[in-house]
Amino acid sequence: MASVRDKSPAMKTVSQSPLDPAFVQDPYPFYARTRAEGALHFWQDYKMPAAFSRAAVHALLRDRRFGREVPSELATGGPAHLAPFLAVEAHSMLELEPPRHTRLRKLVMRAFTSRAIKDLEGDLIALCNNLIDDFPEEPFDLLQHYCTKVPVITICRLLGVPEKMAPQLLQWSHDMVAMYQAGHSKEIELAAAKASSEFASFLRTYVEERRTSPGDDLITRLIEAEEEGEKLSATN
C-alpha cells in the first residue's frame, strides 16, 4: 500500500515498500502518482530523499555538490559485524569521487591495453561454443548452464585464477551483492561480511603471489600499472 503525506512545504513523504509484490510487478503507477505530486520526495521505506523526475535526476547527477562518497566528517563506522564488508566497500571505485576515483581509474585503465582486450575475443568465442556443445539433451536451465558461466569463467581467465575457483568467486559475489537489495536480514549481513573477509584474504594472497611470479593476466598488469609515477597499492 502506497501513501503520500506532507513532510515540509517543499517535500512530501511517500511510503511504498519496494518489497511489495504488486509494486515489484508494476511500479509505474506509483512513480506516476508520486511524480505528479512533485519531483523530490522523502521515501520513508529507504529513509532518504528520492528524485522522481528526469529533470531532477539530471540536475543531481550534474551537480558536483552531490556524489557517492560520504564526506569523512559525516562518515560513521557502521555495525561491528559489517566491518569486513564496509572495509571492502570503502575501496570500491563505484563509491569514490574525484580526485580519488580519477587517479584509480587512470591506473586501472592502464591494465586494459588494446592487445589484452583483443586477446579476449578468441577465448570468449571458444568458451561460448564449448558451453553450447556441452548442453544436455534434456530440458535444462540456460541461466545455470550458460549465462552464469560465461562471465564468471571469463573473470577467472582475466584475473589469471584457476577456473575451478569460479563457483567460489560467484558465491562471494552473490553474498556481497545481496547487501544492495532493498531489504536484507542480519543473516544476509553476516554472509556478506564473511564473503568480504574471505575474498579480501584470497585477493591479498594472490596479489603477493603475482608480485613474485608475474603472469599474463589482469592482476599482474594492475600491479605494474603506473600513472605519473604512481602505482596501485594494497589500500588504494
Image: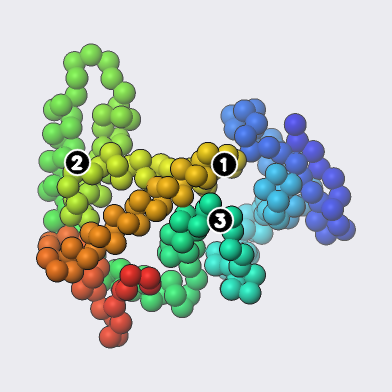
Is 118 rendered above or below residue 230? above
Q: Give the label on residue 80, or none.
A: 3
Residue identifier under label 1? 186
The residue depicted at 55 percent of the width and 64 percent of the height is 68
Q: Residue at x 29, y 58 (%)?
A: 203
The percent coordinates of residue 39 (x first, y second) are: 72, 54
Q: Residue at 39%, 53% (x, y): give it.
A: 197
Q: Quadrant of residue 104?
A: bottom left
Please, is residue 53 above or below residue 93 in the view?
Answer: above
CA gap, disc 1 to disc 3? 12 Å
Image quadrant occupied by the C terminus: bottom left
Q: Left or right of 29: which side holds 133? A: left
Q: How many marks?
A: 3
Q: CA distance from mark 3 to mark 2?
A: 33 Å
Residue wearing tag 2: 164
Along the polypeptide, which appears first: circle 1 or circle 3? 3
Where is 97 relative to 187, above or below?
below
Q: Quadrant of residue 223?
A: bottom left
Q: Quadrant of the N terminus?
A: top right
Instruction: Determine if residue 61 is in view.
Output: no
Regarding mark 3 in the picture, which secondary structure is present there? helix
Q: Nearer the viewer, residue 203 or 104?
A: 203
Q: Position of residue 161 (x, y in %)?
A: 19, 51
Q: Are marks 1 and 3 in contact (CB under 8 Å)?
A: no
Q: Looking at the picture, does residue 149 appear above or below residue 74?
A: above
SS at circle 1: helix
